[in-house]
Amino acid sequence: MNLESLDKEYILHSYARNYTNFVKGDGAKLYSEDGKEYIDFGSGIGVCSVGHGNKELADAICDQASKLIHVSNLWVIEPQVKLAQKIVELSGFDMRLFFANSGAEANEGALKIARKYGQINFENKRYKVITLEHSFHGRTITTVKATGQEKMHTPNFSPYPDGFMHVKSIDDVYKSIDEKTVAVMIELVQGEGGVEPFKKEEIQKLAKFLKEQGLLLIVDEVQTGVYRSGEFLASNYYEIKPDIITLAKGLGGGLPIGAVMTSLKDIFSPGDHGSTFGGNYLSTRGALTVLDILQKEYNSGAIKKNIEAFNSNLEKIAASFTQFFEKSVGLGLMRGLRCKSGEIQNKIVSKAFEKGLIVLKAGRNTVRFLPPITISQDEIEDGFKRLELALMELKD
Ligand SMILES: Cc1ncc(COP(=O)(O)O)c(C=O)c1O
């Protein structure tokens, strides 16, 4: 049986898969089994923040794997502690962290923190969390329910947990707070929901209001975090101090890791939360290396340069192909082209792939770009040439 047949035989069919078999990567380039080269403007859905085949990351993983991979959270784990310290220092926030293995798990941790806060701080035991339309917070039963996209709440997986309310806009948050509300959970740039950033003033006003009310602001930075916005956290870019922040995706450069950080430093007691794999030697040593690499790129101005180059290419494309696009959207190296229809979006993603360029789909008919943060200027130029070729062909 070939790989496609084996996959269809043995893997549950929860993904609409493309059967290209990638065998090697180098920076923002991927190579398939048949020797074709692709520029990867998706980086594994915002995960491979330091690119593919990164030598420094690979060396750190190999070194750690040959010493210790896992001992469990019953013992202190040196790279875990160092990683937490590094994240706190880079964020500038006075917080403590819990390490998990994915974005959804990080968000589960955030929701547990919010619920415990509601239990111990309010006589009427507040527990409700408000989230926004078009949001995406994960695929566990609870984070699916937190996700504000109606299509995700299929009866197939019901009943869902209580305690979530979805509203259309930030303005609607204010009217929807009731005597049971304990927190508001948002992405600062809605990724899956169409790479849609919120306005800075709107977010700052909300953060200030919630603080005055003693309610929590949870910022889901699973996609926006770790320099994706151009700053270490999008919360830094928005100049807010959330109570709880979640991270995953780009943090491990491909290693599975998630984290929840909070200024409620004493919220958990032993037994409140846990994870067998969360924060083990391998993932935290890898994440420490990823942060070292990205911190250097940030300090040298390379990330800023990449954002400028990426965005100016994107603006040119948006202006040259107005028959396909309504506008360009996004922030930092989290960008999108809002298409005039879902059909156009699908055609562009397929045609770009044919031309050797990987781009992603997001909600609201958006073609999405999440390149490695360390992408080179040449790779940016090359990728946009391929996109232009694809669009020229679609135009004809
Ligand atoms: C904002 C946001 N939150 C949570 C998640 C879920 O992360 P994971 O797939 O690692 O569970 C995602 C994944 O796309 C995301 O973009």
Image: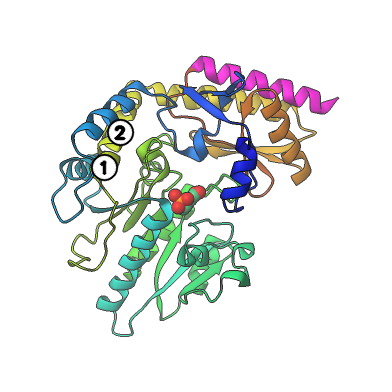
In depth, the one of 377 and 274 nearer the eye is: 274
Instruction: Indicate the position of residue 264 as horizontal and vertical percent values.
Output: 24, 62
Residue type indicated by callout 2: Leu
Q: How many discs appear?
A: 2
- Point out the stretch of residues depicted in magenta: 377-396
**379 relative to 20, above or below:** above
Tell me the crowding category of disc 1: few under 14, some 14 to 19, or many 20 or more residues within 10 angstroms, Cα based: many
Q: Secondary structure at mark 2?
A: helix
Which residue is depicted at the point 62% across and 32% down? 20
Pointer 2 local density, CA inside 10 Å: few below 14, some 14–19, many at least 20: many
Q: Say which label, 2 or 1, has the lower sequence index.
A: 1
What residue do we see at 42% from left, 43% from top?
A: 249
The residue under label 1 is which amino acid type? Ile
Residue linked to disc 1: 87
**Looking at the rendering, which quadrant does residue 319 occupy?**
top right
What residue is shown with label 2?
291
Q: Main secondary structure of the magenta part?
A: helix
Q: Is residue 46 above or below residue 273?
A: above
Quadrant in the picture for the N terminus: top right
